[in-house]
Amino acid sequence: MFNPRIVFASLSVLLVIGLIFEWNSSSKNLKLQDSLAVQSTSGLGGYEKISNGNLEIYIDLKDGSVKEAFLFEKQERDGLFKTRLLSDDGLLKFYFKTSVSGFTNSRPFVVDGLETDSLTISSSDPNGNILQKVFYFDGPNILKVDDNLQLASSSFGNIAAYKTFYRNKNKSIDYGVSFSRDHLAYSTTDDVFHDEQITSIRNREDYLGNWVGYSQKHFVVAVFDKNNQQKISFYPPDEGGVYRFGFTEEAVPVQGGYSSSASVFLGPKQKTILESVAPHFKYNLDLGFVYGIGEFLIVVLNFFYGLVGNWGFSIVLLTLLFKLLLSPLQIMQINSMVKMRRLQPKIQEIQDMHKNDQQKLGMEMMQLYRKEKFNPLAGCFPMIPQIPIFLAMFWVTREAFEFRGEAFLWIPDLAESDPFMIAPVLMGAMMYLSQLMMPKPPQTQGMQAQISRQMMIVFPPMLTLIFMFLPAGVVVYSAINMALSIIPQAIILRRVENNGA
């Protein structure tokens, strides 16, 4: 037999265990300390540095690889002013390297030219072939790497160019990774967007696509070709537990050798930025199965942000907009509640008359509803369109870079859970208040009535526990939406009571 109290107790225990795990084994303070440590040790490996004011790139002269990359934060938070996207240390091995088949430098690369935002290096192999690498920026979030191979003789053979990421399975330690899901991401001819855990790569896999990379909360790193599809290759881990994935393509023959160029995106999951990178690259902004609704919300939220200059108030305005658009449905719901109250005496009379004959009771109730043109489910209809909107808000506030580190009232970060738990508690309290205001269901006696009463006690605290895990942005949206639903509900029901309905 269904027992709401047992269900609630079981879910509560699971949620509390999960909450304790989140706050302890992956505490935000530990994440911050790790991020600060990585930030303070950047470049200590003797790497050459270039920067464009948005990205900070470190190149290792031993093999010409990009060993570290940092993206500057929108604003400094608790001493953290840049976020690591690539690194090669004890916490995370994740770096990028371009190479050409048949060439292995016999000595470290030497610097041929160094500017603030560009670097040219070169080295030779035992056969006298020379590989020159040029690193420079093509916009705020794109690093270009040009490889130019000068041949000592013309018998070098066919040349393949490799543009490869090297990564172990460790999770990013970037500060503020609640609700984060690190994963491989790529686009192929068969699937415009595919993601999977890196540990799922057990054998070599090859595809055709425009880009391949690695995604985490708020950020994505990928090698891409905007105009042409390239061969995407995945390799299982080596003995050190390092996976490889990237592009393989033919180098372009030029006078005296071959050349190849790689484009690497290192940046935020921001709709307007991702759309211009490569075909289907925008899907790195993971909005789940409600992607279209999420895109619309981002556009509207950016519009409101342009007006008020605060993402929290933008959420408030968005909630007001949806409440206005959905007001006809709420009016339908309130009218259903009013009619339910008006029918209560007749419903009670039928229940008393046929309390021992459930079949007859059901038939009489259906006749009453038909006669009064009343649909007992009408009060549920307004909830249906709110479900996909809520899900889209969850994905948007979790993934979109716009909300990273953005404060609102007492909330320090709309993309993280409310550390003071004020918004979840308010949400639960308002839900309980809303249920108290609802008219009693037709079944005022028996098991169904008992279950209804228990649900009124179970759902608000359960909802509070769930919302403790969610990004504060979606909790703010839900709390304001609930408040805007309660106010007209209370006014209309009070007016009905005063009129004696």
Image: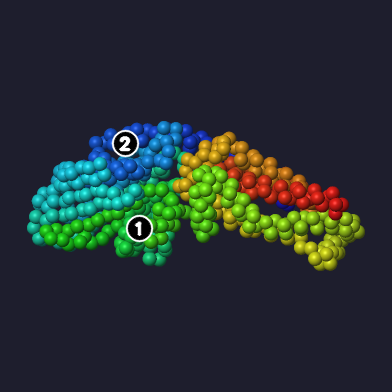
The three-letter code of the residue at mark 1 reads Trp
Quadrant of res 355? bottom right
Position in image of residue 498 (x %, y %): 84, 49
The residue tagged with tag 1: helix, strand or loop?
strand
Q: Earlier in the sequence, mark 1 or mark 2?
A: 2
- Numbered tag placed on residue 303 in the rendering: none
Position in image of residue 374 (x %, y %): 79, 63
Is residue 357 shown left or right of residue 315? right
Position in image of residue 398 (x %, y %): 50, 47
The count of marks equals 2
On the image, numbered disc 1 is attached to which residue?
A: 211
Residue placed most toward the observer, 252 or 461: 252
Residue placed most toward the observer, 216 or 473: 473
Q: CA distance from mark 1 to mark 2?
A: 28 Å
The residue tagged with tag 2: helix, strand or loop?
loop
User: Residue farthest to the front?
Assistant: 307
The three-letter code of the residue at mark 2 reads Ser
Residue shown at 26% from the left, 36% from the top: 45
On the image, numbered disc 2 is attached to which residue?
A: 42
Quadrant location, the C terminus: bottom right
Residue shown at 31% from the left, 36% from the top: 42
